[in-house]
Image (tube, helix red, strand yellow):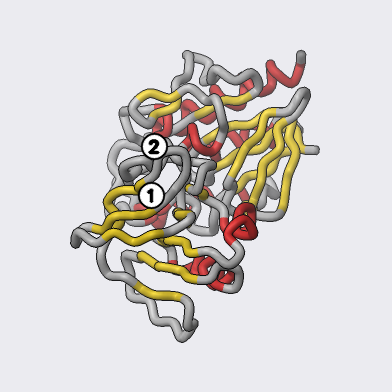
């Protein structure tokens, strides 16, 4: 079991990880090799103290060097669920699980808004994890939205279980799998009262399905951790970066404006120190 699990490898998550490592806490950081896509694509950053006129890739390289110097590794797994237990948190990454005494969420900001009834039918036909819930749809028809080419293997996995897969993706996809039909139109609404019954498309069509899978790079915070208090898609925290769930802290863009690196780094530092106090109890 880890002392601290950090979800997110942007400036806030890195700041929290560095402070945790310095305090000799066992820590696991979930993210990717790019660390922060938002930083990586920045042409020039002028307001981060000590790095005048630095480019995003240059700053990310500096972050990587700091992590390497402290022997902090990034675990390249997508966390699909965080569960609060009696004396620990369990983090689910598809079929793998990781335990930690406390959690710091550094998720960044979600730019894609949920479609109609996506949240309302979560757990009643709507899912964000193929390997978690795929077997519930054996021999059935499902719709799948995938926004990342690296997640197409999960689409293939679902095609081996479901009778029919209607695939929606914002990039060009080619497949020879017979039961996968690629549809160019977007899903605009999920239809159903107590469970998913169909989806409607932007072109006006209605397609009968038993479930809808959203294979997205980022999962909303309140979907990731049940009971987490949010407002307008942002995690509610106090000045110590504590959430409404004991042992869970949040930092960075997921807590609100200003969306700046200096603010994220500062909040990551505060979240880490609040986690130290929690562990000391």
- Judging from the image, what secondary structure is the residue with disc 1 in? helix
In what quadrant of the picture does the N terminus appear? top right
- Near mark 2 (Cα within 10 A), the count class, few <14, some 14-19 or many ≥20, is some
Is there any visible trace of residue 103 in the rendered image? yes
Q: Residue furthest bottom?
A: 176
Task: Determine contact: label 2, label 1, CB under 8 Å.
Answer: yes
- The answer to which of 105 and 16 lies nearer the viewer is 105
Q: Residue at x 75, y 38 (%)?
A: 99
Checking the image for residue 6, the label placed there is none
Image coordinates of residue 88 in percent, x first then y, are 75, 29
Image coordinates of residue 171 in percent, x first then y, are 33, 70
Q: Residue at x 60, y 42 (%)?
A: 81
- Judging from the image, what secondary structure is the residue with disc 2 in? helix
Q: Residue at x 36, y 40 (%)?
A: 117
Q: Residue at x 21, y 58 (%)?
A: 202
In what quadrant of the picture does the C terminus appear? top right
Q: Residue under circle 2?
A: 261
Q: Residue under circle 1?
A: 39
């Amino acid at each position: 079991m880890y002392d601290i699990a950090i979800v997110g490898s942007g400036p806030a998550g890195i700041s929290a990880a560095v402070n945790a490592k310095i305090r000799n806490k066992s820590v696991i950081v979930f993210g990717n090799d790019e660390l922060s896509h938002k930083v990586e694509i920045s042409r020039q950053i002028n307001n981060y103290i000590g790095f005048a006129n630095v480019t995003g890739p240059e700053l990310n390289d500096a972050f990587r060097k700091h992590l390497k110097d402290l022997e902090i590794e990034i675990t390249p797994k997508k966390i699909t669920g965080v569960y609060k237990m009696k004396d620990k948190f369990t983090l689910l990454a598809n079929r793998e699980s990781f335990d930690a005494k406390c959690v710091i969420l550094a998720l960044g900001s979600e730019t894609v808004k949920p479609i109609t009834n996506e949240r309302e039918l979560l757990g009643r036909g709507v899912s964000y994890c193929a390997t978690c819930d795929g077997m519930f749809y054996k021999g059935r028809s499902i719709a799948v939205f995938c926004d990342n080419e690296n997640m197409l293997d999960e689409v293939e996995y679902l095609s081996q279980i479901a009778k029919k897969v209607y695939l929606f993706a914002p990039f060009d996809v080619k497949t020879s799998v017979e039961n996968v039909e690629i549809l160019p139109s977007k899903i605009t609404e999920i239809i159903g009262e107590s469970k998913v019954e169909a989806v409607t498309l932007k072109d006006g069509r209605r397609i009968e399905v038993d479930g809808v899978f959203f294979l997205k790079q980022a999962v909303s915070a309140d979907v990731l951790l049940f009971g987490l208090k949010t407002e307008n898609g942002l995690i509610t925290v106090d000045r110590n970066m504590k959430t409404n769930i004991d042992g869970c802290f949040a930092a960075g863009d997921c807590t609100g404006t200003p969306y700046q690196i200096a603010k994220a780094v500062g909040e990551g530092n505060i979240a880490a120190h609040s986690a130290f106090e929690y562990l000391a109890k």
